[in-house]
Amino acid sequence: MGGLTLKHFILKHRVLNLYRQAIRSVRSIPDPQARKETVAWIRAEFERNKHLTDVPTIEDRLASGRRDLRRILPTMHLSNSRS
């Protein structure tokens, strides 16, 4: 854990909160296959970025993740409710 700062610790907490929020949001997707694919996509995105250590990059990815979550999940809810 050498080299990690208090800022890294705080960002790790924020990343975990975003992950939990994203997974909880997926529960409301009515189609089981769409729900499964969305969870897989979320996990893949977090896995892809788990080795980042640069604070500005982590902060940027967090902001991007929040935007994606707000933009993508409501779209899926609307498209599934029309089916």
Image (cartoon, rainbow, N blue to C red):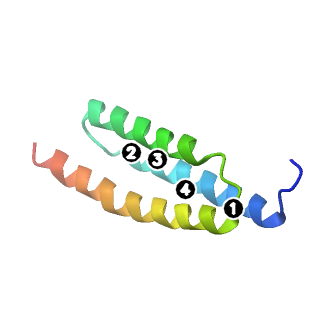
Q: Earlier in the sequence, mark 2 or mark 1?
A: 2
Circles 3 and 4: CB atoms closer than 8 Å: no
| 55 up-or-down from 45: above or below | below
Q: Which residue type does callout 4 highlight?
A: Leu
Circles 4 and 2: CB atoms closer than 8 Å: no
Tell me how far mark 3 sits from mark 2, CA to CA: 5 Å
Circles 3 and 2: CB atoms closer than 8 Å: yes
Instruction: Determine whether the residue tagged by mark 1 lies in a helix, strand or loop.
Output: loop
Tell me how far mark 3 sits from mark 4, CA to CA: 10 Å
Instruction: Determine whether the residue tagged by mark 3 lies in a helix, strand or loop.
Output: helix
| Residue 29 point in image, percent of width and height | 30, 43
Q: Which residue type does callout 1 highlight?
A: Asp
Q: Which mark is drawn over residue 54?
A: 1
Q: Earlier in the sequence, mark 4 or mark 1?
A: 4
Give the residue at the far left of this rendering: 83
Tell me how far mark 4 sits from mark 1, CA to CA: 18 Å
Q: Which mark is drawn over residue 24?
A: 3
